[in-house]
Image (cartoon, coloured by chain):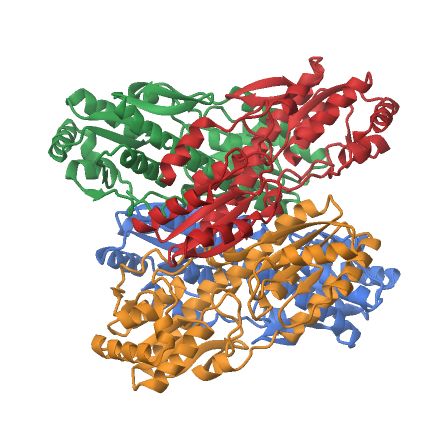
Chain colours: A blue, B green, C orange, D red
Amino acid sequence: MNACIRAVVRAALARDLDIIGIRRGYTGLIAGDTVPLDRTAIRNVIHLGGTILETSRSPDFYTRDGRLRAAASIERMGLDGLILIGGEGTFQGASLLAADADTAALVGVPGSIDNDIYGTDYCIGFDTAANCAVDAIDRIRDTARSHERLFFIEVMGRESGYLALEGGIAGGAEELVIPEEEVSVTQMSERIRGGFSIGKRSAIVVVAEGETPGISFHLADEVKKHLDLDSRVVVLGHLQRGGPPTLRDRVLGSLLGVTAVEALLDGRSGCMVGEVRGELAYTPLEETWQKKKPLDEDLRRVFTILSD
Amino acid sequence: MNACIRAVVRAALARDLDIIGIRRGYTGLIAGDTVPLDRTAIRNVIHLGGTILETSRSPDFYTRDGRLRAAASIERMGLDGLILIGGEGTFQGASLLAADADTAALVGVPGSIDNDIYGTDYCIGFDTAANCAVDAIDRIRDTARSHERLFFIEVMGRESGYLALEGGIAGGAEELVIPEEEVSVTQMSERIRGGFSIGKRSAIVVVAEGETPGISFHLADEVKKHLDLDSRVVVLGHLQRGGPPTLRDRVLGSLLGVTAVEALLDGRSGCMVGEVRGELAYTPLEETWQKKKPLDEDLRRVFTILSD
Amino acid sequence: MNACIRAVVRAALARDLDIIGIRRGYTGLIAGDTVPLDRTAIRNVIHLGGTILETSRSPDFYTRDGRLRAAASIERMGLDGLILIGGEGTFQGASLLAADADTAALVGVPGSIDNDIYGTDYCIGFDTAANCAVDAIDRIRDTARSHERLFFIEVMGRESGYLALEGGIAGGAEELVIPEEEVSVTQMSERIRGGFSIGKRSAIVVVAEGETPGISFHLADEVKKHLDLDSRVVVLGHLQRGGPPTLRDRVLGSLLGVTAVEALLDGRSGCMVGEVRGELAYTPLEETWQKKKPLDEDLRRVFTILSD
Amino acid sequence: MNACIRAVVRAALARDLDIIGIRRGYTGLIAGDTVPLDRTAIRNVIHLGGTILETSRSPDFYTRDGRLRAAASIERMGLDGLILIGGEGTFQGASLLAADADTAALVGVPGSIDNDIYGTDYCIGFDTAANCAVDAIDRIRDTARSHERLFFIEVMGRESGYLALEGGIAGGAEELVIPEEEVSVTQMSERIRGGFSIGKRSAIVVVAEGETPGISFHLADEVKKHLDLDSRVVVLGHLQRGGPPTLRDRVLGSLLGVTAVEALLDGRSGCMVGEVRGELAYTPLEETWQKKKPLDEDLRRVFTILSD
């Protein structure tokens, strides 16, 4: 995120635009809680996890009244354009704001470790989170060699299995539990049993947490009924939200930050900038949260071949 | 571990000793399951997590009969001395073996990520596992800044709170839940409430898993009854057993590996080599598991001062 | 690389193909130096840096005689198809081999940390190497804050500035020295002086080593003539060739490995599989080394905006 | 360093002391350049590399006049005690200050990545820097397997070989070039040749930079005259000064920070707090820079055995 904020600021300064930062998302927008975003503010932040502008939930913004107060605040601050870095919730909010009020131009930048936003192949934050998952699987692998054991590694992913899928391919996992697919514990147990029968010493199951963080402990109990194996559970949770961002996230964030500023200058509004098939793409904000981003078919197939 | 195995081999070769490796611990000892340990076998292993000799549980070795078969196997292989890298269970087994049979000289080297072995200040594996915990807390900290939230980070530590204590100091945690101390959820909740009242945005609780991996989810529910705060849980579990070993673990493993070989050559038996207050120390194997290693008082006090 | 080898093996086994590994590249091909590549061989290798098949230079293969011996060896081994993971040199060799002899089908997979192969947007190994450069810049940044200093960080990149460019964007560097562009030490010094005059405390110059590893020490001396500043030099060199591969490299390697097997089964030969603009692409082997892959224009522009 | 600053602040607050931070070392002391050090200032800094108080060289402080101005500044600020985190230069300065003026109580805390300060077994910063060196050697090892090659890895260490020694043990290096010992390129080349003759594929030479950063390129040229081998050079330089501190550095910094505050309260002055053989130790400031800290004999011997 910080790489993106930095890019927005530098791109704005390069065009002699005035720019300020809104703290804590829509909460700060309503309250007019701002920080100056000059060269100094963005010095030495590109490598920091999290975001220097902080985040929050804003229940107020879910109400029409809250959004009208936000629009008033935008007018008071004299903003011509607003760049919103966030995910489905952020863009849904922006769509509603645009419907409720004739306000500043709105341009979105996709940031989501779940990589679940329609209109971009990758979201800022995904690569960092996925590498965190891979590092976890690597560490498990070191001990997995020695024991006949089953490991459950629970990653984030509320409605999307991207993290689990790419993490599972890169980590060399055996099984995948993702929101897009029904899980049969019986079949999974049978496949694991089969793997052990041809010489595997351990099996790694990558689980997207879905709506129930900690669900892997439950899954482990279920599998135990079918397979007489020791299970170990790792729950990564918010680990994946932190840590120094990877190259890909920083480069993507930098590119989309510059693009967002130029989109505003080009007169665009109500859209999200993204990268689709290697090209910059502009998607109407409504589509970003109304359309469901499908799993990558090729990668799903690769996982099946590699985990066999 | 591998740094230690490598050191044992190199030290043995330097003294023109014959050396072989026993695979999978006592299971392999009983079965005579060995691998040659020459220069080639230990090349490029110092940076690998886990152990090239693998580990296992050996129910057989818990029986007198199993130990007599192990003693017979030792005689069959013609071993004069045995170097055992492990923890309480390993050394208890070695004590029983020595009691049951007149067998080879036995020298132990302390390997335990829990750092719970009496007779050495640090065990091989602890520093790596503790740095893994610190890395996890750092990542959590990146997001902790933005939200009013409580984070539970569950580390290993069945009977010992060392990992949680040092990890908590180094990670800057607010609360500690360790086997050595009773926890009052009420008091913990009050302290956390107090922290928030003086401006903290988040609190990090480091929890030693004790005998119930996953216990943090339960703790989070309990605290929720006292504090109206969102909680997030991370369970590191076996993550801490893997990954490339740290400098300290490799240097300690190398030093103790060389020392173990020299101990055998000096005619020592029935003892564990360790490092106490910066000096090499030899502790009777019985004491290593019969005596309880206390938490470091100074560090416990430092935690209290720093977390205040 | 190992992720790709693993994918090739798994994809081949899934189609009931026989497969063997050639050790040490063309040297091993001429010598018939092979290893079995079954399930066991590729277990627990996906996270290892380097390649389990090893590499070498093969002066013999540069001669027609050498290539004819290679063709004879291919026939002796009864190979129908050959999958070659490598860079320009590898593919040039393959082109020559195909010209010299009617031999097995040849399919290339692009592996190059310099990312300098025409016919694919990214090569296997680039993301890992570039993240290594970013990590280095991050570490420098930690101390850069405190001193008025100039840092030169020398990365790989013989004829291509990709590593320096993406590493420089992601690391937030001030200056870029790459093979594609002439460097004026005078102008660079002036820009750096300008940065210090508006409050910067340090400047980071990312240098592609080009044909002269260690050139940064020379550059530092040159700049010193214009600017009275302390300089510090870091030369990453082969650091960037090792370390656990990143998610992107493993996923790309897995995808291209599967694709290469399927390309052979589809009757393709004399081509390299790659990914261009998010789509699988097949490029004649000749083009991969005859055509020069240009720097990404967008990213070059982003660097200029961000480093200003 | 930041862990230590945080510990000083927390320990001071726990005793109801007033505390301020001096920015940029002696430069800031003379200028009275201070920052408030309250709970907020030290929140979320424990994991940052570098130091929040920044550092600088102070030529002024090398003069008697400069030190008298520092003493006047101390009196003006009303300081009763001063905690100095630094190395030989810092403590030599402090000794001179105490000789020149009747000033506040002075207590030192050893911070040096070279680990070259007499009066403590380990200095804050060493473990982080040494782990950085080990990580570098690990990465080199990944490629070293495949080629017959010589690698030079240059680490810091102006007058002390600690970093090279412990890094070399932990990295499994073959040769050591340190300031404490004369190097014979001829003998080194012979030993390397011997290693290759018994099957080694590569050799890693760890070089302390001494007074000539970049010296490894020169060494590589010298060895080339004796051995017909490709050499590759990595110069870590200031890489080792950055990055998130390790557990050991943070725990040591925390412990010594608390101890420094308590030393002042106990009426101590003119001493450095350290840890010797696992016990807190207080060493007169003069001794810390007048006495030479010897290399650890045991570890030197271990290196010889392991690298053989």
Is the N terminus of chain C in the top left, top right, bottom left or bottom right quadrant?
bottom left
- Expressed as whole percent of the image width and height from the top left, the position of residue C295 reads 61, 74
Depth check, front residue: C214 or C104: C214
Is the C terminus of chain C in the top left, top right, bottom left or bottom right quadrant?
bottom right
In the displayed structure, does residue D175 sit left or right of residue C28?
right
The residue shown at (59%, 68%) is C162
Quarter assignment of residue C197: bottom right
- Expressed as whole percent of the image width and height from the top left, the position of residue C245 reads 46, 58
- Expressed as whole percent of the image width and height from the top left, the position of residue C32 reads 25, 70
Depth check, front residue: D124 or A57: D124
The residue shown at (57%, 48%) is D215
Which residue sits furthest top?
Answer: D267
| Residue A89 in view (yes/no) | no
B258 w.r.t. A237: above or below: above
| Residue D61 in view (yes/no) | yes
D81 w.r.t. B44: above or below: above
The residue shown at (28%, 34%) is B12
Depth check, front residue: B157 or D115: D115
C275 w.r.t. C21: above or below: below
- Expressed as whole percent of the image width and height from the top left, the position of residue A183 reads 38, 61
In the displayed structure, does residue C268 sit left or right of residue C236?
left
The residue shown at (65%, 57%) is C218
Quarter assignment of residue B87: top left
In the displayed structure, does residue D15 sit left or right of residue B294?
right
In the displayed structure, does residue D159 sit left or right of residue C76?
right
